[in-house]
Amino acid sequence: MSDLHTTPLTALHKELGAKMTGFAGYEMPVQFSLGVMKEHLHTREKAGLFDVSHMGQVLIRHEAGYGGAAADLETLVPADLLGLGEKRQRYGLFTNDTGGILDDLMITNRGDHIFAVVNAACKGADIAHMRAGLPDCEVVAVTDRALLALQGPEAAGALAPIAAGCEIMRFMDTGIFTSDYGELWISRSGYTGEDGFEISVPEAEAERLARDLLAQDAVEPVGLGARDSLRLEAGLCLYGQDIDTTTTPVEAGLSWSIGKARRADGARAGGFPGAERILDEIAGGVARCRMGLAPEGRAPMRAGTELFANEDADTPIGQVTSGAFGPSVGAPVAMGYVAASHASEGTRIFGELRGKRLPVEVAKLPFVAPGFKR
Amino acid sequence: MKFTEEHEWLDEEDGVVTVGITEHAAEQLGDIVFVELPEVGAEVSKDDEIVVIESVKAASDILAPLDGEIVEVNEALVDEPSKINEDPMGAAWFFKMKPADTSQMDDYMDEAAYKAFID
């Protein structure tokens, strides 16, 4: 795996016996000794520690401060960023001119500038896109920091001794903490549906921080395998799989990320790539929707499984984009795009597996109740 | 006991061969979450895909190791696929078959050869 990038924690993962795999150009742990199922369940019961250092950390500065940077970034992202409070974080999307999605990202108001976290596979393109589209901003890739995620009901208890005060943060609050591990950039958010934190730490201190977190009884290392099943149960999209340039935010059920101010009769309506199509879709609806899918049997319906209205129909009405066994649900779970005519909750449709049409119910997302501290 | 390159084990007793997957295979597959077994009475040919197993990672097929008739399947695995990770060489056998020609077993590895094969 010599052509893959490493993270500041790669050596620790190997020491802990992780099975490693290539992901978005990085050598990453897919599972540790507990295995995917137990790592998943442990995260929902106690706390899991994930290395997400492959993701892109970006600072966006403007001479007029946060307001300047936010106003500029609103030209690329259909979220209400000028309305985002200081030290608060918000989910957003980069859209393209046809209303497709270039990437999804987390955006933080850091008082006088923006901190953003973008997907590993997209980070080079995202940074180029921002540098081209935000000529009055300085777009800085942060390359000397690791990113850890500590997720689960016991995450706050495990992090509090390290970053005093983190336990009183609410969901989507952020803060800069001085600690024994240098300056930590912490947000109370994540990608599992659980309470938890993402922690940006100077790379030289990352391994020591990870070891000290793992030394606590509640905390186990968790790989990308469980990260995927956790986010799927939580109904969260994986870029490149559930959303991409061929899906619009409205089809993907992500209209909630387009604040009122950016909508048709809002204070700053439109003004982002693909606005015409996206605002039309918000007003007039879409032909297909991303929905939860609950297969009736035990067979997982994985990405690519075609969906049909009945057992005999010739033409598919949709496709699974993510599917797996949901360890907390105790049954297979999936999500995918379904024709609007068949997308209401409770509709019974069929997925074709190995030549057989098996029943699957259109379901509400998420499959598990969120554990966020609002 | 005999072993295939597909990581199945075959245990013959009184003309009936019990088939499962090896500990090595179960470990490589990871947590198993779904099993689909053949029908009792099915006539199968060597290399037919007759069992589907899915782990948290992916789906895999188990091939019929011999020509013959399926005489029993381990239904308990359908409700509790995790048994395959717990006891792949024992309680979590997949099916029993009556081979058309037991000499087909001679092509497969013994335990020492299988151990060498997976190293």
Image: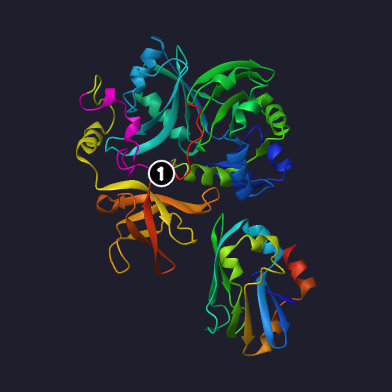
Residue at 39% over, 58% down = A360
Q: Chain of mark 1?
A: A
Q: Is residue A243 above or below residue A53?
A: below
- Rendering quarter of residue A71: top left
Question: x, y percentage for residue A320?
Answer: 40, 54
User: Can the viewer see residue A29 in this picture?
Assistant: no
Horizontal side of residue A69 vs B94, given as left or right = left
Nearer to us in this view, A264 or A358: A358
The image quadrant that residue A7 belongs to is top right
Secondary structure type for disc 1: loop
The residue closer to the viewer here, A188 or A26, is A188
Q: Residue at x 39, y 62 (%)?
A: A359
Q: Is residue A124 left or right of residue B65?
A: left
Asked whether residue B100 is in view, the answer is yes
Residue B16 x %, y %: 67, 85
Residue situated furthest bottom in the rendering: B101
In the depicted structure, whether residue B119 falls above or below residue A30: below
Per the image, the residue denoted by label 1 is A365
- Is A301 displayed left or right of A207 in the figure? left
| Image coordinates for residue B112, horizontal then vertical, percent | 80, 71
> Is residue A214 within the magenta segment?
no
Q: Residue furthest top?
A: A64
Asked which quadrant contains residue A366, the reply is: top left
Q: Position of residue A54 (x, y in %)?
A: 56, 35
The residue located at (23%, 33%) in the rendering is A279
Query: What range is drawn magenta here?
Result: A237-265
- The rendered magenta stretch, by its main secondary structure, is classed as loop
